[in-house]
Image (cartoon, rainbow, N blue to C red):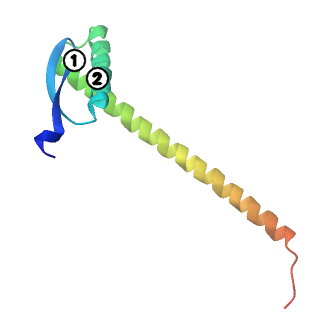
Amino acid sequence: MSNSEQQKVTIRLLDKEYMIACPDGAEAELLASADYLDQKMRNIRGNGKTVGLERIAVMAGLNIAHELLKSREDNRQNIEDQIRRLGSKIDRSLNERARQTPKTDD
């Protein structure tokens, strides 16, 4: 991707500004991500147990990574449950059809 397809976007994390290169059209996503990260960092700072911007950023990153992994696992489990339910429906339909189909002697 060339530099002409990117722009600089200013984000704020814990009242500190950062200039971030961003692909054209992805500004809203970047800003939403920065807002989410900022909120996580503020929550950690507000708990008063973690000090220092770097430690707060690391803790926020770990928390967000945990949320992502948990969400992926939940989604995987939901998909597996749906597949099992669909498989059961298919099996019931096939069994019902087999009972309704008259057998012929060849």
Q: Is residue 102 above or below residue 47?
A: below
The residue indicated by pointer 2 is 37
Quarter of the figure with residue 67: top left
Foreground residue among 33 and 41: 33
Foreground residue among 19 and 61: 19
Measured in 3D between alpha carbons, the distance from the residue under mark 2 to the one under mark 1, in whole angstroms, is 7 Å
* Residue sitting farthest toward the bottom: 106
Residue 24 in view: yes
Foreground residue among 90 and 59: 90
Q: Is residue 71 left or right of residue 45?
A: right
The residue at the point 20 percent across, 11 percent down is 15
The residue at the point 35 percent across, 32 percent down is 66
Asked if the residue at tag 1 contacts the one at tag 2, i.e. Cβ–Cβ closer than 8 Å, the answer is yes
Badge 2 density bin: few <14, some 14–19, many ≥20, Cα 10 Å = some
- The picture places residue 16, in percent across and down from the top left corner, at 16, 14
Q: Amino acid at mark 2?
A: Leu
Circle 2 SS class: helix
The residue at the point 16 percent across, 32 percent down is 7
Quarter of the figure with residue 91: bottom right
Q: Quadrant of the C terminus?
A: bottom right
Q: Amino acid at mark 1?
A: Leu
Badge 1 density bin: few <14, some 14–19, many ≥20, Cα 10 Å = some
> Which label was assigned to residue 47?
none
Q: Is residue 57 above or below residue 97?
A: above
* Residue sitting farthest toward the left: 3
- The picture places residue 44, in percent across and down from the top left corner, at 29, 15
The residue indicated by pointer 1 is 13
